[in-house]
Image: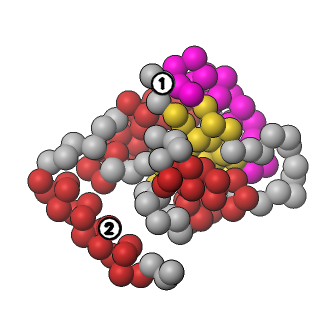
Amino acid sequence: MKIKIAIGADHGGFELKKALINKLNAEYEILDAGANKFDSTDDYPDFSMPVAQSVSSGKADKGIIICGSGVGACIVANKVPGARASVCHDTYSAHQGVEHDDMNILCLGARVIGIELAFEIANAFLAAKFSGEERHRRRFNKAIEIEKRFLRT
């Protein structure tokens, strides 16, 4: 069974999203959260939230969100309980964030990196697994407790 990847992007990441989907489509099941057409006035929260919710709910195994810098997408995604998003513009951070911190959403800046590097980073992120080592579980559990403490229902 293919891993399910939710992918979303605003106008800043629209072209990079299309290119990534074309490269990843053969190996992964892609859940496209939009944008489905270029709109220079769209807003990153409208595409970050569906990706984060898909990952948080278990509908997708991992997520990738792309905007101009990756920062806005990351901020929005981390508002969703269970989403653990980070901007990564290098392969080390992309796999280490999963292995040590159980990162489940990769945020990319289309105005920062090109398609080939984005593809390498996405592959590093998608191939990585949480180590489960005691020190990583301990730190992860502390982060989850902080999230629970500040959740508003």
Asked whether residue 106 is in view, the answer is no
Element carrying mark 2: helix
Q: At which x and y percent is residue 79?
A: 53, 69
The residue furthest top is: 26
**Which residue is disc 1 drawn over?**
2
Q: How many dots with numbers?
A: 2
In the image, what residue occupies the spot 52% across and 34% down? 4
**Which residue type carries mark 2?**
Ile
In the image, what residue occupies the spot 14% across and 48% down? 133
Task: Write the start and end of the magenta stretch as one range.
Answer: 10-29
In the image, what residue occupies the spot 13% across and 56% down? 135
Q: Nearer the viewer, residue 134 or 87?
A: 134
Asked whether residue 51 is in view, the answer is yes
Q: Mark 2 to mark 1: distance in Å? A: 28 Å
**Which residue type carries mark 1?**
Lys
- Tell me which corner region of the image, top left, top right, bottom left or bottom right, holds residue 49: bottom right
- Tell me which corner region of the image, top left, top right, bottom left or bottom right, holds residue 73: bottom right
Q: At which x and y percent is residue 40?
A: 87, 52
Q: Quadrant of the N terminus?
A: top left
**Which residue is disc 2 drawn over?**
144
How many C-alpha atoms fall within 10 Å of the one at disc 1: few (<14), some, or many (≥20)? few
